[in-house]
Amino acid sequence: MILIIDDDIAVRTSLTLLLQSEGYAIATASSKEEALAILSQESVSLIILDLNFSIETSGTEGMQLLEEIKKRNSAIPVILITGWGTIELAVKGMKLGAVDFINKPWVNEYLLQSVKTVLQLKETKSTHKTRKQLDEQYHLKYIIGEDPRMLELLETAGRVAATDASVLITGESGTGKELIAEAIHQNSLRANKPFVKVNLGGISVSLFESEMFGHVRGAFTDARSDRTGRFEMANRGTIFLDEIGDLDLSSQVKLLRVLQDRTYEVLGSSRTKTVDIRVICATNKNLDEMVALGSFREDLFYRINLISIHLPPLRERKADIPLLVNFFLNNMKEIYNRPGLSVTAAAMKWLEQLPLPGNIRQLKNLIERSVLISAKEKLDIEDFRSQLALSTVKKGSIQLPEVGTLTLEEIEVLMIQKALSFHNNKIAKAAASLGLTRSSLYRRLDKHNIPYDESQD
């Protein structure tokens, strides 16, 4: 049963008709006393509480009632209904235990989505499954790991996938946040719809609206044709907002509106569009600290953080390193047509002890570089050590030429020539040692007119 608490009969009637049409049993209350009486007599699954449920408009009574409800039964989820003027109060309500807040006037589809999501989350319980059980129930084959914390977060990802809950994925760079986001999408009811990735750190402030919401021809000087925004591309699917901690405050305000109302305007058009999306965000920053410092909006933080998943760094789950090494090697056996590739036991132990500040991304890069550079099929410690030394040179530990003696282009030419010489003009190995693809190295060779032997490709 869903309990609606509001003194306005029009609000109660509207919400009752909407929710009953979806098959929900409804009870209503117009006062604090009536609401608490129902709670003591009935089994309530969810409460929808208007912060201003009485003549008094400060929201104080609504907040007091929320506290009373949570004291009596903290397990009952509460969704707050609020106007823009009381958003700050709604955020305070989230701190007191409310699970969501919806703006007036609400969008029926979004309100129903929120109700459904909250009820689904309430029903799903953690059962501490083994990796085998998780693989049987969910599609997780590209996520490698058997560390207990990884199993716990994979189970959480699998359980919340079927809902439309907003998910915030945190963790250091290279820990696999994007893979978790994709897994949530692939295990959701939206799996056959778009999965749109957006690196917010790579979008300038001036282009944010155009990139996210699209623009019409003539909206600004260089708008020569219409552009479809990322939210429209993701409609009915999932949008993955990576590096959300890099978003400036003005863009945060614009993002908040579409996340709260699921509505937006295309730049240069006055027509409002509605979007149906699942939102997953990721960051390697501490958003709690940013909220405290005022560099990240608190209301946006609560909007994206219904479910939080934190990925541990690789150094805290060392037992997963051999699994990852073997996974990467198996892929490279096919990619580079070297079926005999393997790693010595000593090398595997050595790899397990590395700090790997770049996490999985750094490990993969190290394995691939070592495979490309070494002609041996069985890789040993020295094969990895040489490549680790090349890839982890610390700032200030190499002697750079004095400023003004060489241009950046001249330094690039020298490094390419040195790599070609060191690897006997073998393009693939030289490219790998420089951190480039072969095609990227070829472009630089042509750009700088550096001679090379095409037979060595």
Image (cartoon, rainbow, N blue to C red):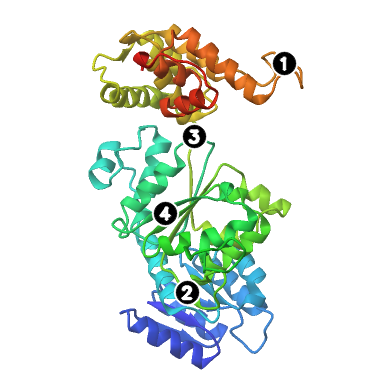
Q: To which residue does mark 2 refer?
A: 273
Measure the C-alpha gap from mark 4 to mark 3. 19 Å
- The amino acid type found where label 2 is placed reads Lys
Viewer-proximal residue, 313 or 258? Answer: 258
Q: Earlier in the sequence, mark 1 or mark 4?
A: 4
Q: Position of residue 239 (x, y in %)?
A: 44, 56
Viewer-proximal residue, 175 or 406? Answer: 406
Residue 344 vs 201, above or below: the answer is above
Direction from residue 219 to residue 347 in the image, left or right? left
Q: Earlier in the sequence, mark 4 or mark 3?
A: 3
State the SS at label 4: strand
Badge 2 vs badge 3, beta-carbon distance below 8 Å = no
Q: Earlier in the sequence, mark 1 or mark 3?
A: 3
Q: Which mark is residue 196?
A: 4
Measure the C-alpha gap from mark 2 to mark 4. 18 Å
- The amino acid type found where label 4 is placed reads Val
Badge 2 vs badge 4, beta-carbon distance below 8 Å = no
State the SS at label 3: loop
Q: To which residue does mark 1 refer?
A: 401
- The amino acid type found where label 3 is placed reads Gly
Inspect this view and state whether residue 436 appears: no
State the SS at label 1: loop
Q: Position of residue 56 (x, y in %)?
A: 67, 86
Measure the C-alpha gap from mark 2 to mark 1. 55 Å
State the SS at label 2: strand
Task: Point out the frontmost of discs 4 and 3.
Answer: 4
